Image (cartoon, rainbow, N blue to C red):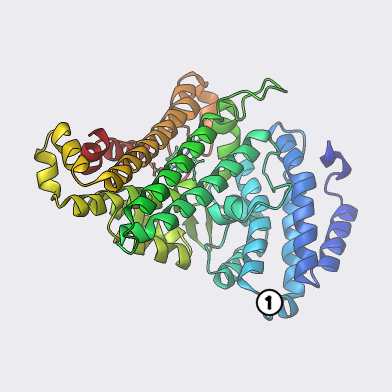
Amino acid sequence: MAFALLPASSLWTRHVILADARASAANIFEFLADAKWWVRTYLPDLNSAIEIGEAPIELLVTRVRSWVEAIEENRPTLFAGMEQSHALQVLQVFGFVVGSIERHLQGTGAKLGDGVGRVPGPDGLLLSLGAIARHSPRDSHYTFWLTNNEEPILTFTGNAGEVFFNKVVNETQLVLSDVSASVRDIRVAEENDLGRAAVIVRQAAQKVVGLHGRYREYMLRDPKTGERNMTPEFFMAKFRQYLLPFPVGGVLREGPNATNTTGWPLLDFLVGTLDEQYKDTVSQRFRWMSEIDQERVRVEMHMPSLAERILDLLEISPEMLQAMTQQQIRAAAFGSGSEFMALFDAYQALAGAALRLSDIHISLIMNYLVRPSKTIDPATIAKCPVKPVTGVGGNNLEHTFRIAEMRRKHPIVRCLAAA
Ligand code: HEM
């Protein structure tokens, strides 16, 4: 195992680690390259060894301590003109190591924040980095997934399931962000060629179907190894445990949570699956989003959805739609011309694909958390900082089930999609 190359925390070892950190901390690029190399090479094995009591947590504490000390010594040079993206990357590497320390300590019953407290200094440093990065002073969905795509990616566990999760979150973000951009002009009636609009919406539907295929792959087995792409035991008892909340600067901070990515709300706003409660829920997530993401989500939340655009073209109000039979809706669409009909069919394909994507996500929650939580032994659950039947931030799953139900039963989208 790679951690065997790191002997226990003798003074000599600490001295060497600090000398290494000092040498690279003279320059931000060198520091980042060395720190990422260390996380890639040693952290996963070290985490596994600490989890089973075969390596001391001190190996991680010494690493963070030396990074903090070396950065503080070089602070004037390093911080002068530090760019937002550099600060975010420093938060990324600290996030992996500080999060690991917290995970191991909380796993043995220590208080939240005892891990950060074990290392003098990172609190203040993380706060300064957070201010430059305009980001929470710890890791997040940006550092853990969206900007973690340089191969091989950084991981807590080195497990193929963690890598697979990273790929699917990144694909979700790319595909849904792209789909919502492609349909924008149709929603605001700047694209009035309905034939072209039908082609764009049909392509969007195909992309969402493709994404659904990726979510199906979680449970599939790799033909070469016979292993699932991600096993429920790994997800529930190992992987999520590293995404735990802990305080920085005296304030409890949530860590990486895929809930805070913008792709899904953008898809909802374009399809039209939203209500006041959902708008409120998404607005509550703004505090975890960058300014650019917040702005985009805010704009798209208030833009007419594709469902509203279709009703406009049909000259039917939402109230009238709900009073109509499926045959009457279909007849009205048919009477609006062949190009409109193509757009209507494409919208139905898109709304159906979006609903299936939401439904498979709920199936994954059932398969990866709710069902296995019933068979895991209570002693293991007691040691899990992140409990199986909550979100990583501690939210009740009922909230997520309500969102899926809102999509399934949306009064307007359901009428349009079923006609
Ligand atoms: C095995 C795969 C997955 C499992 C078991 C899973 C589990 C969960 C859980 C437990 C929640 C509730 C979290 C909370 O309330 O804090 C949640 C919500 C959410 N997850 Fe996942 N997740 C998976 C994959 C993904 C992926 C790949 C994405 C892509 C970005 C994603 C995006 C979301 C979003 C946006 C929510 C908020 C609720 C919603 O809009 O439906 N999830 N997920």
Which quadrant does the C terminus fall into?
Answer: top left
Which quadrant does the N terminus fall into?
Answer: top right
In the picture shown, does residue 164 fall above or below 69? above
* Three-letter code, disc 1: Phe
In the picture shown, does residue 234 fall above or below 259? above
**Is residue 334 found left or right of 372 in the rendered image?**
left
Say which quarter of the image contains residue 233: top right
Q: Where is residue 56 in the image (x, y as percent from the top left)?
A: 75, 41
Q: Position of residue 341 (x, y in %)?
A: 28, 43
Q: Position of residue 232 (x, y in %)?
A: 55, 27
Asked whether the viewer can see residue 106, the reply is no
In the picture shown, does residue 122 fall above or below 312? below
Query: Which quadrant of the figure shows ligand 1?
Result: top left
Between residue 221 and residue 181, name the one nearer to us: 181
Q: Which residue lies furthest to the front in this view?
A: 338
Between residue 65 and residue 33, name the one nearer to us: 33
Q: Which residue is drawn at 55% across and 46% down?
A: 171
Q: What element carries label 1?
A: helix
Asked whether mark 1 lies closer than 8 Å to ligand 1, one says: no
Between residue 114 and residue 388, name the one nearer to us: 388
Instruction: Answer few, some or many: residues within 10 Å of disc 1's Cα (few below 14, many 20 plus, some between 14 and 19).
Output: some
Q: Which residue is drawn at 72% across and 72% down?
A: 72
Q: Position of residue 106 (x, y in %)?
A: 57, 42
**Is residue 252 found left or right of 417 in the rendered image?**
right
Residue occupied by mark 1: 79
Q: Which residue is drawn at 24% across and 36% down?
A: 409
Asked whether the viewer can see residue 279, the reply is yes
Badge count: 1
Say which quarter of the image contains residue 86: bottom right
